[in-house]
């Protein structure tokens, strides 16, 4: 049985006409009739009962049409996926991830992704928001995970992941640690600890100061672990975004929601990638990561 014969038969049934099906398949009406007759001969059963210019399906024809249509759809999807994989120059995926984020959700998403696509090599590049943006522009990243800080550009896909809630981590011995929630006003006399790469302090300070209204006094750490140790030693407070599952708070620290006028402070996080460089693996990872974050 030829694949084309199956397509011709399904086209005839869909069009309810040999003439229209022949035009759709770019062959003559006599040729499409001959192909379907050959198909019936091979199967040894009638699929169509012809009555002048009309026809009806036999029970075998109805079965063949219904299941053949599903099979053709699966074959088409199989073909498209094969082409997509063949067009990928390298089976690799470089993910940009904020250095001040807990990586539990990222690790879980990568584990799920690699189970499905073990042929793809994954690498992680961490940095501040501005660093990740620069990496994306210079094509060092395939996809970046970060909050929205500027207007979206038409050259990039911006795939919404989650609205995050802001928390503060502070020494459990600090007087503020007993409060159920904190406001920006509560923190005005304390230093704000930020996880920043050297040379990027000014842009991050400006964002936290102007956009979130946090302290005018800032301290900087190279990693999330170092920042938590600084908070533990009463040097200030650490702003934390709740995106994905947060780990248990470090012993000696208290994690408290940060609110403004009684409302949670939220920030929007997106996966972003270049439209010209998009491929199946980038899109699939973005979907998996969103699913992990929103469990």
Image: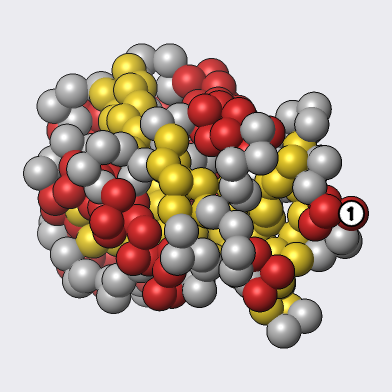
Q: How many marks?
A: 1
Would you say 58 lies left or right of 275 here?
right
| Identity of the residue furthest to the left in this view | 138
Name the residue beneath numbered marker 1: 178
- The residue positioned 43% from the left and 15% from the top of the image is 118
Near-viewer residue (240 or 230): 230
Instruction: Report the colour scheme.
Output: secondary structure
Q: Considering only vertical position in the picture, is 240 above or below 57?
A: above
- The residue positioned 17% from the left and 48% from the top of the image is 134
Q: Is residue 276 visible?
A: yes
- The residue positioned 74% from the left and 29% from the top of the image is 250
- The residue positioned 32% from the left and 17% from the top of the image is 121
Q: Is residue 75 visible?
A: no
x, y percent for residue 246: 70, 40
**Circle 1: element type:** helix
Would you say 18 lies left or right of 153 here?
right
Name the quarter where the N terminus is drawn. Answer: top left
Would you say 133 lies left or right of 77 here?
left
Q: Considering only vertical position in the picture, is 57 above or below 85?
A: below
x, y percent for residue 266: 60, 69
In the rendered image, which quarter is residue 119 located in?
A: top left
x, y percent for residue 184: 63, 71
Near-viewer residue (120 or 201): 201
Q: Residues within 10 Å of mark 1 (few under 14, many from 20)?
A: few
Q: Considering only vertical position in the picture, is 185 above or below 80?
A: below
């Amino acid at each position: 049985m030829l694949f084309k014969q199956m397509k011709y038969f399904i086209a005839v049934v869909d069009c309810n006409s040999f003439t229209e099906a022949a035009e759709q398949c770019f062959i003559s009406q006599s040729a499409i009739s001959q192909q379907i007759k050959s198909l019936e001969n091979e199967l040894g059963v009638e699929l169509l009962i012809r009555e002048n210019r009309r026809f009806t399906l036999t029970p075998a024809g109805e079965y063949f049409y219904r299941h053949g249509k599903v099979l053709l759809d699966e074959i088409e999807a199989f073909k498209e996926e094969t082409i997509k994989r063949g067009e990928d120059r390298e089976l690799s995926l470089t993910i940009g991830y904020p250095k001040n984020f807990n990586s539990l959700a990222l690790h879980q998403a990568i584990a799920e992704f690699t189970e499905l696509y073990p042929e793809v090599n994954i690498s992680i590049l961490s940095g501040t928001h501005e660093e990740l943006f620069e990496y994306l522009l210079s094509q060092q990243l395939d996809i970046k995970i970060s909050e929205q800080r500027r207007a979206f550009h038409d050259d990039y896909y911006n795939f919404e992941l989650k609205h995050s809630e802001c928390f503060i981590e502070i020494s459990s011995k600090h007087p503020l640690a007993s409060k159920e929630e904190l406001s920006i006003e509560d923190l005005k006399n304390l230093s704000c600890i930020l996880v920043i790469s050297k040379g990027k302090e000014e842009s991050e300070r400006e964002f936290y100061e102007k956009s979130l209204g946090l302290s005018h006094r800032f301290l900087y750490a190279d990693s999330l672990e170092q920042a938590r140790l600084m908070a533990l030693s009463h040097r200030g407070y650490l702003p934390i975004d709740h995106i994905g599952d947060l780990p248990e708070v470090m012993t000696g620290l208290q994690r408290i929601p940060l609110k403004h006028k009684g409302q949670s402070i939220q920030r929007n996080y997106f996966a972003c990638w270049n439209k010209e460089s998009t491929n199946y693996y980038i899109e699939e990872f973005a979907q998996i990561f969103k699913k992990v974050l929103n469990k």
